């Protein structure tokens, strides 16, 4: 009796282990990537931690002085208060400092401003990042779609007027950096023609919800989005053209033609699908890059976003805020990269099965 | 010590040979490839201006508030800026710094990339893995914010420092590409034959590996110059590297600060640097893509 | 060459090549891939075109379906297809829509390197279905499924499993068999096989050819095989056309050609193959270098390498002469009277 129940237990255990183990094995590519990302996250933390030490001056003392003036407390108390608020104490061992810092990060405390009370990195992220992402992702989306079509067409019809125009566009648009295009656009459409507003993200007189508000936001975002897109379209067109030319040289395109498939079908199912596959990773990676912010464009358009806050922090030498924003950006990018990387393995049937 | 010297010597010799080979290839392609010709012409033009311009058109930094935003005239070919200084001469004067920054950023980036990439790919093993993790870190942390931070904390006083700052965060992508090229070459038979024949490692590196990736590096040299200009102008426009007011980026910074877009007479003032930058970048793109076409047969139109 | 609109139907031959010349026209030079080919391919036969790489076999074959690779063009002559329903079709004269209908329906093809002939991002079934629906738009799902299963069975593949797979999940031999099945899916009258087993091992090769021979015999589909492997030809083909430098040197029944080896090139080819019976030192390679298709050729194209050449060979181009029934040779040796008929 006892033997059979032990056997049953053994069998159940083996099945569980096999199933769970099998699951982990099948998705092993994912775990490897996650592991790698964690290592990078750790390194980014180390880097961020040492960032403060590299900056000139003694930030704690400065902060403490300011606190003591502001709250009329003795310098010693202010100093201790400073170390608490900023999660940084130069007097304890470096190792201990690092542990405190990492603990803070895991709790979500990326840092506080030295000069503006109650302004934390989390607050800035909450209030300003959405605006930046809104503009950048719309621009990415638009330029991807337009660029893909342009590039696909360029690859298929290698000669002709369309090709000439596209080529000229790519060269011209790539020659001027995006923020300078912003200046040109402001001048033409904002100042001279007065079709679009030249600064800000919305009209502060409007109520913060409803259709008029949304339309107003889009109205203000229009020129920055176009400025971003001008340059990016060229990039996507070139990438798509390169990929499509490679695909066109493949045997299966020729074989499809020999089977009597219509040109339209060949372009959509054979050319487009196969050319787009490698570009999807680029798209996801580009999305990750958006989190780095665009301080220049926001400066030119006076657009209150993540990038402009970062510039402000730099300008005021707000060390801890800079450190916090920097570490936040790095974290987000690492995670976004991880997602982008894993995404590709999921879409390409070739990679899905035999991956390592 | 002697070993290091020998290594550096080999490096320099290779660098010279490579540059010579580069220019030979360049001039060969100049004869038949339109793009290369135009691109090279533009860049050569700028180089000439940078070298001889300030001698022919010396720049007088005296301000003259009364004459601000004067329209173009025989005396001031492009008019004057917001402080009455001649714009044309400022542009010429600034071109020197701009080109130095571009050139040196490219140089430093390439040296770092090659060293990291080739050593990492060639030596392999644990060394490779460590370097790759570090490279990954440099790749994922967004470069522009870091450059802004560095620019604000190391006061930039001269173009070379600027170039160093720009290249510190720029080498990661190229080094990875070089590394993958090295690895794929390493697998190829002729490298293994060399090892079997007992050729020294440095011989393998310089005589066999490098020539295969040299065309790739040349094209990247030009592309990095282009990126360097975009980045340097951007950093200058944020006010973080204002050491030379006649630098094109500094001109744009002034334009931004005084709201030149709203002043009609100042249109030439802010438009000139933009157009100049545009022309220079176009030259680089044309040269780079022309060289790419010449050296990469797949893109050639039959 | 005069083009008549009314073609005469030929019930014995399925393909008629009439003084066909194909050139690759480039910026500065023109390459003559096929020169004045006049040949009739017998219906239901297993005809092989044999020659070295670059002898013009593939170019000739793809002209049957008007799929010449850029910048190839037919510069002279025509290709006529005598369909079993009595129609005579000149594919070059069809409009785009008719051309697409013709392809795969009447003539299909198994490519060299099936490894990359399938779309990597579509399953096998979806590719079968796509081609089927393209030619028979009103087809129902069951019909398509049934036909796909049927053709896979002919090549001995397990349909339910294979149809769901992606190309990279199949082995080389399996992929090649899928391509053969694919070629059968619209019941064509002729299948072109371009070096179908070059990348495969000998055993798989045997297996695939026995399947092909079976298809030829039981389904009555004409097979046009392009290969450089004369051992395969000797074993499976009915007729052989020996090509060199874009021209047909000899054509005839396989047994006859192998026995008589009229053309010096044919003899050279067979001599160059190791034999199971004869001693190894009887094996002789063909002297000389491959021919250039760019330079204009005076006289016989094989003359520079021919061990039996004489004066006339280097001055005058030989004329194709009938030596036996359905057996032609293009060589001065068999035309000593100086006849100029073909």
Image: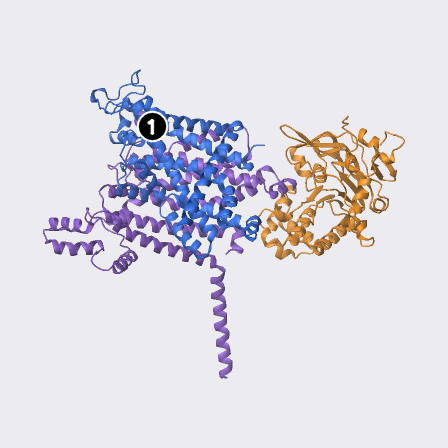
Chain colours: A purple, B blue, C orange
User: Which is more toward the observer, C169 or C139?
Assistant: C169
The quarter of the picture where residue B169 lies is top left
Image spot of residue A156 (x, y percent) = 55, 35
Q: Is residue C39 above or below residue B74?
A: below
For disc 1, the marked residue is B273
- Left or right: B87 as drawn, with respect to B19: left
- The chain letter under disc 1 is B
Image spot of residue B158 (x, y percent) = 29, 36
Report the number of numbered marks.
1
The residue at 12%/51% (across/down) is: A68
The residue sitting at the front extreme is B2
User: Which is more toward the observer, C149 or A99?
Assistant: A99
> Looking at the image, can residue B108 be seen?
yes
Q: Is residue C205 above or below residue A250?
A: below
- Left or right: C40 as drawn, with respect to A129: right
Helix, strand or loop status at disc 1: helix
Q: Is residue C153 above or below residue C45?
A: below
User: Which is more toward the observer, C275 or A353?
Assistant: C275
> Looking at the image, can residue A170 be seen?
no
Image spot of residue C175 (x, y percent) = 64, 51
Question: Dot 1, crowdedness within 10 Å: few (<14), some or many (≥20)?
Answer: many
- Left or right: C167 as drawn, with respect to C333: left
The residue at 37%/50% (across/down) is: B137
The residue sitting at the right extreme is C337
């Amino acid at each position: 009796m006892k033997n059979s129940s032990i056997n049953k237990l053994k069998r159940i255990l083996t099945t569980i282990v096999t199933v769970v183990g099998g699951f982990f094995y099948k998705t092993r590519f994912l775990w490897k990537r996650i592991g790698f990302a964690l290592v990078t996250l750790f390194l980014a933390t180390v880097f961020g931690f040492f960032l403060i030490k590299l900056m000139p001056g003694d930030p704690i003392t400065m902060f403490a002085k300011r606190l003591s003036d502001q709250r009329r407390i003795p310098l010693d108390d202010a100093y201790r208060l400073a170390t608490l608020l900023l999660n940084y104490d130069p007097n304890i061992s470096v190792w201990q400092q690092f542990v405190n810092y990492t603990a803070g990060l895991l709790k979500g405390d990326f840092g506080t401003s030295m000069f503006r009370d109650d302004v934390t990195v989390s607050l800035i992220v909450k209030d300003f990042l959405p605006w930046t992402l809104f503009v950048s992702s719309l621009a990415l989306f638009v330029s991807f779609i337009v660029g893909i079509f342009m590039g696909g067409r360029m690859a298929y019809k290698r000669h002709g007027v369309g090709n000439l125009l596209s080529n000229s566009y790519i060269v011209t648009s790539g020659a001027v950096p995006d923020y300078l295009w912003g200046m040109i656009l402001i001048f033409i459409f904002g100042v001279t023609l007065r079709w679009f507003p030249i600064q800000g993200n919305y009209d502060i007189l409007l109520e913060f919800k409803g259709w008029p508000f949304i339309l107003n936001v889009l109205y203000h975002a229009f020129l920055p989005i176009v400025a971003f897109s001008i340059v990016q379209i060229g990039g996507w067109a070139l990438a798509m053209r390169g990929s499509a030319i490679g695909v066109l040289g493949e045997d299966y395109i020729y074989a499809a033609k020999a089977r009597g498939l219509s040109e339209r079908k060949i372009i959509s199912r054979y050319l487009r699908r196969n050319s787009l596959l490698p570009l999807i990773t680029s798209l996801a990676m580009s999305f990750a890059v958006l989190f780095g912010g665009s301080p220049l464009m926001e400066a030119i358009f006076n657009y209150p976003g993540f990038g402009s806050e970062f510039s402000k922090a730099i300008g005021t030498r707000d060390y801890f805020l800079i450190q916090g924003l920097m570490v936040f950006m790095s974290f987000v990018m690492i995670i976004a990269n991880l997602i982008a990387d894993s995404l590709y393995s999921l879409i390409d049937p070739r990679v899905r099965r035999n991956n390592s | 010590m002697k070993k290091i010297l020998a290594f550096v010597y080999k490096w320099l010799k290779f660098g010279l040979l490579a540059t010579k080979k580069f220019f030979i290839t360049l001039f060969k392609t100049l004869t038949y490839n339109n793009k290369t010709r135009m691109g090279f012409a533009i860049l050569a033009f700028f180089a000439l201006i940078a070298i001889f311009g300030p001698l022919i058109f010396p720049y007088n930094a005296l301000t003259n508030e009364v004459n601000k935003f004067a329209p173009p005239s025989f005396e001031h070919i492009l008019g004057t800026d917001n402080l009455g200084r001649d714009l044309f001469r400022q542009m010429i004067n600034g071109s020197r710094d701009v080109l130095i920054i571009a050139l040196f950023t490219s140089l430093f980036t390439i040296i770092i990339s090659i060293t990291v990439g080739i050593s990492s790919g060639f030596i392999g093993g644990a060394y490779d893995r460590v370097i790759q993790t570090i490279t990954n870190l440099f790749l994922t942390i967004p470069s522009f914010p870091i450059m802004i931070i560095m620019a604000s904390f190391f006061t930039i006083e001269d173009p070379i420092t600027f170039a160093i700052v720009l290249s510190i965060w720029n080498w990661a992508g190229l080094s990875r590409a070089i590394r993958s090229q090295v690895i794929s070459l390493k697998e190829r038979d002729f490298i293994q034959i060399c090892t079997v024949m007992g050729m020294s490692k440095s011989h393998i590196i310089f005589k066999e590996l490098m020539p295969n990736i040299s065309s790739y590096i040349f094209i990247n040299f030009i592309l990095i110059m282009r990126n360097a200009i975009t980045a340097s102008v951007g950093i200058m426009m944020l006010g973080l590297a204002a050491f030379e007011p006649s630098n094109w980026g500094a001109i744009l910074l002034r334009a931004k600060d005084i709201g030149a877009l709203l002043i009609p007479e100042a249109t030439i003032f802010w438009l000139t640097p933009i157009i100049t930058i545009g022309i220079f970048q176009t030259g680089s793109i044309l040269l780079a893509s022309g060289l790419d076409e010449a050296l990469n047969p797949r893109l050639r139109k039959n | 060459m005069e083009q008549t609109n009314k073609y005469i139907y030929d019930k014995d031959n399925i393909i008629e090549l009439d003084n066909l010349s194909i050139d690759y026209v480039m910026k500065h030079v023109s390459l003559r891939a096929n020169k004045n080919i006049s040949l009739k391919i017998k219906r239901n036969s297993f005809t092989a075109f044999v020659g070295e790489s670059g002898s013009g076999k593939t170019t000739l074959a793809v002209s049957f379906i008007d799929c010449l690779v850029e910048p190839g063009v037919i510069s002279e002559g025509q290709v006529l297809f005598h369909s079993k329903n009595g129609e005579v079709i000149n594919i070059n004269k069809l409009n785009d829509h008719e051309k697409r209908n013709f392809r795969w329906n009447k003539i299909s093809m198994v490519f060299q390197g099936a490894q990359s002939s399938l779309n990597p991002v579509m399953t096998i079934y979806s590719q079968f279905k796509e081609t089927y629906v393209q030619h028979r738009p009103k087809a129902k799902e069951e019909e398509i499924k049934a036909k796909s299963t049927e053709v896979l069975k002919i090549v001995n593949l397990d349909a339910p499993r294979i149809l769901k797979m992606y190309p990279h999940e199949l082995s080389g031999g399996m992929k090649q068999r899928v391509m053969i099945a694919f070629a059968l899916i619209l019941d064509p009258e002729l299948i072109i096989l371009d070096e179908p087993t070059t990348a495969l091992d000998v055993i798989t090769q045997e297996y695939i050819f026995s399947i092909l021979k079976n298809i030829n015999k039981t389904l009555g589909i004409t097979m046009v095989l392009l290969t450089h492997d004369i051992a395969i030809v000797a074993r499976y083909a009915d007729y052989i056309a020996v090509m060199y430098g874009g021209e047909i040197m000899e054509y005839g029944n396989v047994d006859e050609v192998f026995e008589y080896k009229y053309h010096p090139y044919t003899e050279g080819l067979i001599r160059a193959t190791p034999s199971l019976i004869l001693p190894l030192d009887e094996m002789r390679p063909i002297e000389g270098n491959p021919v250039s298709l760019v330079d204009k050729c005076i006289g016989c194209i094989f003359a520079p390498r021919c061990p039996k050449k004489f004066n006339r060979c280097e001055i005058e181009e030989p004329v194709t002469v009938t030596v036996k029934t359905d057996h032609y040779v293009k060589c001065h040796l068999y035309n000593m009277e100086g006849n100029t008929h073909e």
